[in-house]
Image (cartoon, helix red, strand yellow):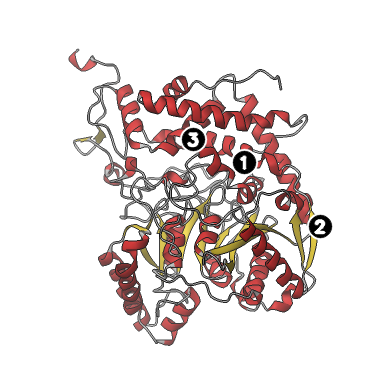
Amino acid sequence: MSAEKMNIDVSYVAQLARIELDETTKQRLQSEMEEIVGFVDQLGTLDVEGIEPTAHAAPLTNVLRDDKAGTPYERSTMLANAPATVDDELIKVPPVIPGEEEA
Amino acid sequence: MSTYTLTQAAKALTNGAISSDELTKNYLERVKSVDSKVKAFLSIDEEYILNQAKASDLRRSKGETLSDFDGVPIVMKDNIAVKDLPCTCASKILEKFVSPYDATVTKRLKEKGMVMFGRANMDEFAMGSSCENSGFQKTCNPWDLERVPGGSSGGSAAAVASLQAPVALGSDTGGSIRQPAAFCGVAGLKPTYGRISRYGLVAFASSLDQIGPLAHDSVDLAAILDIISGNDPLDSTSLPDQATNILESIVQTTPDDLKGVKIGLPKEYFSGDGLSPEIAASMTATQKALENAGAQLVEVSLPRTEYAIATYYIIATAEASANLARFDGIRYGARTEHADDLMKTYFETRGNGFGEEVKRRIILGTYALSSGYYDAYYLRAQKVRTLIRQDFEKAHEACDLILTPVSPCLPFKFGEKSNPLQMYLSDIFTIAVNLAGNCAVSVPASIDAATGLPIGVQFVGPAMGEEKLLRISRAFEQIREQKEFIPNL
């Protein structure tokens, strides 16, 4: 691994993660993240040549079930926690494109 | 009465000494008496609880008990789904969420007639080692109310420790059952990864999370393990094996079972000044007790120990960033009222709904997976994980179980570990086990004379080694000098 220092830009990453941060929080997180990333960078010192990654502790792959359709839950059950619904059938969501509801 | 273990409570019910109604009422009285100080519970629905107890008594009167444990209460960590009860994960973003279904573990406990007894406090989304990250309240250590109970299953541990229930379920991703168990003077088991279905457990890090029991001793841990373990078609990461059936074996254990057992001491865990003197003293006393009982101590090595925390905090946060993406204000959970378009809804809902630590971890995980950094961080960490797993496999060739401390220090005071990285570093003894996927148990070992605080030790077994693990921890419970661990509340 090259010695080039990886820099974390909390503002940019928060955008990716869709989390709004105020300025104070952003600055505090920036310095905390730099310290933490500096710590995890130590993994770069290990030789991992030829090592297979472990995605899962359990040695399982491609666990499938029978391709049979089912409806385990009623619609009303699935909508019970929705913040807003329409006709007890649909989840009401904000406009995807700002201003489109005026069209 | 409230010193009943799960085993004692079950026996009393079977013998007719007490009814489930009386038993649960006793625990509810205890809650009223101590939980204003301990604050272990986020919610507790008395009517719901007493209805279950009455149903149990009715079954018993008809000779239709579902199991030996029919009618015994069990506390559930608030990230495990119980139908019609809250499942907040101690987060504001799920403050009003009510589970529409039962987790598989819930279903299995209900099938045995156990009484769902309240929702336990935790660190938000299981991210933390002190319960200080709960979005709602701080749980206090029953042994010293100014100290943390540990985390993230702090509420579960504190509830059992303060005798508000005989047993609880928690979840363990990096030590979140074992560390609070040690801090609160109770026993806690992290089963082999894949033993317990994760269906109905709100996911934090899917390749590391495991549900497990907290109780007063290894017999009770085994009883719950037998009930909740086993393959589940609803969890494709669950192992193909059926439920364990080890309770009888653990009940039959005697100190003689320690004769000839090889206990491995990882040299990397005992070198340097990583341990506080109290912990070091407790470890020494534990080793002596085991040796006197006929066990053989052998030195083993876990060479990649120093990389475990970094590896964990990349993998766990990366997986968490993906698992928590679903909390977007759309289908369930909180939704910001102030946004007039979709994007703003995401940003504000998540910005307002998640606490500090959760935000920290999502950001770290997102970074580790982002374009240009994936290979350097996530992929690399997964490779180091393989090395760590191999370290454990090799160590277990030389010993039956590995013995380690649980925490490098005694339960700390609120606010003492305010630096996030400092908090992460205290996970050093528990975290590698989740990466490797092995089973491990934390049992109380001693009480520190100066502070009166409990100290736990950890036994780590090979994958699928729960029977051997709990036999040995049970035998240790029988030989350790301190017999009971009950705080003065």
> CA gap, disc 2 to disc 1?
24 Å
Q: In the displayed structure, would residue A51 be above or below residue B86? A: above
Q: Secondary structure at mark 1?
A: helix
User: Mark 2 touching mark 1, by CB under 8 A?
Assistant: no
Which chain does tag 1 point to? B
What residue sits 57% from the left and 38% below the top? B313
Are discs 2 and 1 both within one chain? yes
- The residue marked by circle 3 belongs to what chain? B
Q: Residue at x 48, y 46 (%)?
A: B128
Asked if the residue at tag 1 contacts the one at tag 3, i.e. Cβ–Cβ closer than 8 Å, the answer is no
In this rendering, would B332 be left or right of B266?
left
Under tag 3, what secondary structure? helix
Residue that label 2 marks: B398
Direction top: furthest residue: A103
Q: Is residue A44 above or below residue B82?
A: above
What amino acid is labelled 1 in the image? Answer: Ile
**Which sits earlier in the primary sequence, circle 2 or circle 3?**
3
Dot 1, how many residues are within 10 Å of its Cα: few (below 14), some (14-19), or many (20+)? Answer: many
Report which residue position mark 1 lands on. B309
Give the distance between the C-alpha atoms of the residues marked 2 and 3, in whole angstroms.
37 Å
Q: Is residue B275 above or below residue A43?
A: below
Label 2: how many residues lie within 10 Å, few (<14), some (14-19) or many (20+)?
A: some
Residue B400: x and y, percent? 75, 62
What amino acid is labelled 2 in the image? Ala
Q: Which mark is residue B361?
A: 3
Q: Is residue B304 left or right of residue B231?
A: right
